[in-house]
Amino acid sequence: MSSAQADVTLHSFPTIFSLSGKIAVVTGGSRGLGLHAASGLIQAGCKKVFITSRKAQACEEACAALNALPNPEGWEEPRAVSVPADIGRDVKEIERLVKEVAKVVDRVDILFANAGATCKWLLIFVCKKVGFVRLSEVTFASFWGKVR
């Protein structure tokens, strides 16, 4: 086997990308890329995935579909939790999202910031309030400025 072929052969694919026991929040998680990401997070072993978007019914439908996925690790149900919030327009909605998540878990390991109007202040606020991995405001602001 050539060196390159040996490098790309994955003998234990399920364990390489395991997110077993991790807690995630997916903004804009009720459809499209956010819903696909939430599905991948659940199927990779996340213990809980919080779905947020502006539309409550869309969040509930997404969570119902996600909670119907197989649960081979036997995590406590529901694994997908709906927290509708319009985080792009109101800081109080971000505070409410953080409080709702904190009622269920004591940490968040993954923040998938996919909401159409997600701003840098959402990530910085959530990082400081819930205990996400700390981000450098300067680095993030610099990155965000280039993306926008």
Image (cartoon, rainbow, N blue to C red):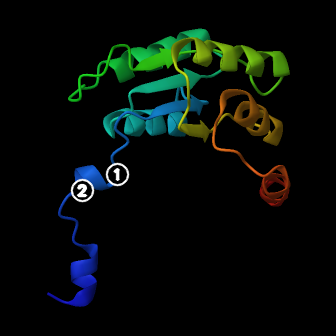
Measured as percent of width and height from the top left, residue 61 is found at 45, 14
Within 10 Å of disc 1 (Cα), the crowding (few <14, some 14-19, many 20+) is few
Q: Amino acid at mark 1?
A: Phe
Disc 2 crowd rating (10 Å Cα; few below 14, some 14-19, many 20+) is few
Res 70 quadrant in image: top left
Q: Say which residue appears at 39% left-offset and 14% top-offset.
A: 64
Q: Position of residue 85 (x, y in %)?
A: 69, 17
Q: Is residue 37 left or right of residue 138?
A: left
Which type of secondary structure does the marked residue at label 1 adopt? loop
Closer-to-camera residue (86/3): 3
Inspect this view and state whether residue 90 appears.
no
Q: Is residue 53 left or right of residue 120?
A: left
- Above or below, comparing residue 6 to residue 3 in the picture: above
Question: Which residue occupies 24% across, 56% down?
Answer: 13
Counting every numbered tag in the picture gives 2
With respect to residue 81, does 124 lie above or below?
below
Kindly report the distance in space between the C-alpha atoms of the residues bearing marks 2 and 1: 7 Å
**Given the image, on which type of amino acid does mark 2 rest?**
Phe
Residue 13 - label: 2
Residue 129 visible: yes
Q: Is residue 58 above or below residue 40?
A: above
Q: What secondary structure is found at the residue carrying circle 2?
A: helix
- In the current view of this chain or complex, which residue is farthest to the left? 1
Residue behind mark 1: 17
- Looking at this view, is 124 or 31 the one in front? 124
Q: Residue at x 39, y 20 (%)?
A: 79
| Mark 2–mark 1 CB contact (< 8 Å) | yes
In the rendered structure, the answer to whether residue 140 lies left or right of residue 8 reads right
Provide residue 26's location: percent of width, then percent of height: 56, 32
User: If the image is split into quadrants, where does the N terminus sit?
Assistant: bottom left
In the image, residue 32 above or below residue 79? below
Quarter of image, res 40? top left
